[in-house]
Image (cartoon, grey):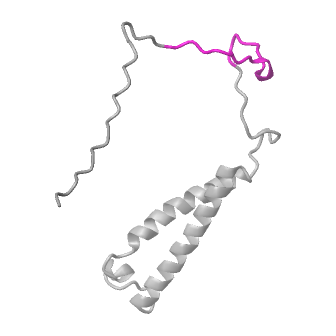
Amino acid sequence: MYTWIKLIWAASAVLLVLLVLLHSPKGDGLGGIGGQAQLFTSTKTAEKTLNQITWTLTVVFLGLTVALSAGWIAQPGADTTSSIPIIQIPGTTTAPSELRIPDEVEPILEIPNSKPKAAAPAIAPKAAKSKPS
């Protein structure tokens, strides 16, 4: 079932691209492609039908995208007990609960001959000028 859903998702993506390309920027729509489309009675009907199919495929594509990416559809052979993958680094045996965080951290990079800068002198506020009377 998962494979079929992915196939429907991919097909809806391709069809959606094709249908968007069929839309005309000036309102010609399907009528501008080799004359008026024989499938429909008028250009307005053709454009309306094209819009309905495009919106339907958009909803199908976005719905399947969310369902597939959220993991709501079970993959065959997938472990459904945890959604977070656990990576084991070769050569390590320390479990995450046994990790110790050091109390003090040493600096990674020391810059030679670096001295802390002196604090900038405080700027005294200017005295208010008195107006001559």
Q: Main secondary structure of the magenta part?
A: loop
User: Visible in this render: residue 39?
Assistant: no
| Residue 129 falls inside the magenta stretch | no
Q: Residue at x 75, y 18 (%)?
A: 99
User: Is residue 18 left or right of 65 when viewed as pictured?
Assistant: left
- The picture places residue 52, in percent across and down from the top left corner, at 53, 79
Q: Residue at x 71, y 21 (%)?
A: 88
Of residues 131 and 90, the one nearer the viewer is 131
- Residue 18: quadrant of the picture: bottom left
Name the image quarter holding the N terminus.
bottom right
Q: Residue at x 48, y 78 (%)?
A: 50
- The picture places residue 49, in percent across and down from the top left corner, at 50, 83
Magenta-highlighted residues: 89-108
- Residue 83: quadrant of the picture: top right
Of residues 87 and 74, the one nearer the viewer is 87
Q: Residue at x 60, y 58 (%)?
A: 9
